Image (spheres, grey):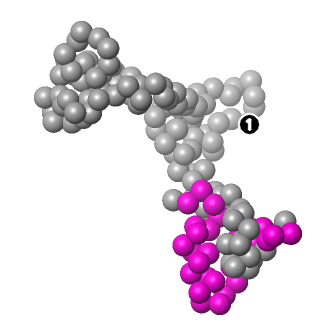
Amino acid sequence: MAMSQFSYAAVASYRMRGEQLPVAGGFDAAGHLTQDPAAIEASKRPLPIGYWKGSGLALMLHMVATMLSGGCATFEIPTDSERETKLSQIFIAINAQSSEQSDTSTTCNHKQPCPVNKCDIPVSTRCKREKKILRKAFQ
């Protein structure tokens, strides 16, 4: 999914058909909002995700957060701030170093790529241990 309101392919498609975008999709060379696909391509300044794509993405992320956290969906949260509990909040932490040091040439007993870090635990044991931890976390 493009992180802009319209993908570059969609903008090009509108331009080739000689049509304007249905809503403003970016900026022209002068910095003004425009529906002109050729101007957006020339400036390379599309609008970020929004409108229907932004609301769709927000809805999807909200549903995932609600399911993963086991908390309340937005419409279930009381308006009284004193009773506001079980909020659907998740935090995603990404360890950039682990992806740099990973070695996917070694596979576990499930034939899936496994990162090989600097430790003495065999890969298959680590995979089983990680799966066990994940199962407990999401029960």
The answer to whether residue 89 is above or below residue 17 is above
- In the image, 77 versus 138, the foreground residue is 138
Question: What is the number of callouts on the image?
Answer: 1
Q: Residue furthest top?
A: 120
Residue 7 is a magenta residue: yes
The answer to whether residue 50 is above or below residue 15 is above
Which of the 4 image quarters holds residue 84?
top right
Point out residue 3 in the picture as x, y percentages from the top left corner.
Answer: 60, 56
In magenta, the rendered stretch is: 2-30
Which of the 4 image quarters holds residue 105?
top left
SS at badge 1: loop
Q: Residue at x 56, y 81 (%)?
A: 13
Point out residue 102 in the picture as x, y percentages from the top left corner.
Answer: 34, 28
Judging by the rendered image, the residue that carries numbered circle 1 is: 79
Residue 22 shows in the view: no
Name the side, left or right, on which 54 lies relative to 125.
right
Q: Residue furthest bottom?
A: 18
Residue 6 is a magenta residue: yes
